[in-house]
Image (cartoon, grey):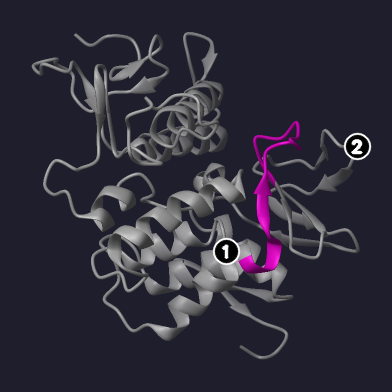
């Protein structure tokens, strides 16, 4: 009844929000980040269940879709290399991509907060691509604050603080700590604080160093120190090799962060929905781990 991959177009390299094509400009997609989050979830589901369809790995399918969707978002929505948007397009970013054009709006408003947040939410460990080019992230975020007259966001403050964290995490964390606001829909103040603190501690995500593990990311902080993060969902230990020659062993069901000077681990993890950046925060802050109801509790070395 349904086409292969449903609403993902291998030709376009990204998903579409509608299964039909009733518009003059063709088909469209608004929230690239929602599609990316869906495929990040598919990767995790496939990795944890080791499921296959007709001999094909669900995890590898998720990796394929996630990779295409990320690069399409950077190319068509954010125009990361400044080669795609037409010369008469007045923005650094497009909130909706059509087959035959761009739009700076959402389906319910043209307010700037909504039109920028729609391609960030939900910000999480699958969103690291937004920080691959720190300067470009700063340009897009700067355009947002120019349109809104500053960073006193009212509609999506948590999500937009997280977006700002990809260009200047310390500044975004300061903005967060100065504000008292109602958390965004499907977000929490704890999540925003966790993500901004992790980015402040670990630095900017890099795309020039990759590994042979599905769940990994390399960061470089402002002091120039490199932090290698890798998670092993399997029930046996494995060695993770990075493209710059760095290698270290990651125990079973364990998240490992290797700094230039030390290596730390959080073990016994079976769900990236619980680990993700929360564990990165704990590791970066020198925390100890204790089992918690429905998740994990952390105690920092300073007693927090």
Say whether residue 170 is left or right of residue 288: left
Give the mark, 1 or 2, whose residue is nearer the N terminus: 1
Q: Nearer the viewer, residue 246 or 181?
A: 181
Rendering coords of residue 92 (x, y %):
41, 41
Give the image quarter of residue 275: bottom right
Tell me what residue is drawn at x 78 percent, y 49 percent: 251
Q: Which of the two marks, 1 or 2, is nearer to us in this view?
A: 1
Say whether residue 208 is left or right of residue 170: right
Say whether residue 283 is left or right of residue 292: right
Give the image quarter of residue 158: bottom left
Rendering coords of residue 182 (x, y %):
26, 76
Rendering coords of residue 91 (x, y %):
35, 41
* Magenta-colored span: 200-217
Say whether residue 39 is left or right of residue 253: left
Q: Is residue 237 above or below residue 88?
A: below
Queried whether the magenta region covers residue 93, the answer comes back as no
Q: Please give the residue where the numbered disc 1 appears in the rendered image.
A: 168
């Amino acid at each position: 009844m349904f086409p292969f991959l449903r609403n993902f177009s291998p030709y376009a390299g990204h998903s579409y929000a509608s299964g039909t094509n009733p518009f003059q400009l063709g088909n469209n997609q608004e929230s690239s980040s929602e599609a990316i989050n869906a495929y990040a979830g598919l990767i995790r589901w496939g990795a944890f269940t080791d499921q296959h369809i007709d001999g094909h790995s669900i995890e590898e399918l998720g990796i394929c879709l996630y990779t295409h969707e990320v690069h399409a978002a950077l190319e068509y929505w954010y125009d990361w290399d400044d080669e795609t948007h037409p010369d008469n397009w007045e923005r650094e970013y497009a909130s909706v991509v059509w087959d035959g054009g761009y739009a700076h709006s959402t389906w319910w408003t043209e307010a700037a907060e909504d039109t920028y947040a729609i391609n960030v939410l939900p910000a999480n460990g699958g969103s690291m691509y937004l920080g691959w080019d720190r300067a470009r992230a700063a340009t897009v975020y700067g355009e947002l604050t120019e349109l809104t007259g500053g960073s006193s966001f009212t509609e999506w403050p948590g999500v937009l603080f997280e977006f700002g964290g990809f260009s200047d995490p310390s500044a975004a964390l300061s903005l967060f700590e100065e504000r008292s606001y109602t958390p965004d829909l499907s977000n929490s103040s704890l999540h925003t604080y966790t993500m901004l603190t992790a980015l402040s501690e670990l630095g900017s995500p890099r795309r020039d160093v990759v590994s042979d593990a599905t769940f990994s990311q390399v960061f470089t902080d402002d002091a120039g120190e490199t932090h290698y993060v890798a998670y092993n969902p399997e029930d046996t230990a494995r060695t993770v090799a990075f493209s710059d020659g760095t290698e270290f062993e990651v125990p079973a069901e364990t998240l490992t962060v290797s700094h230039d000077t030390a290596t730390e681990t959080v073990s016994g993890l079976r769900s990236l929905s619980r680990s993700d950046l929360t564990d990165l925060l704990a590791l970066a802050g020198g925390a100890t781990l204790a089992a918690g109801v429905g998740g994990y509790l952390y105690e920092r070395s300073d007693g927090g």
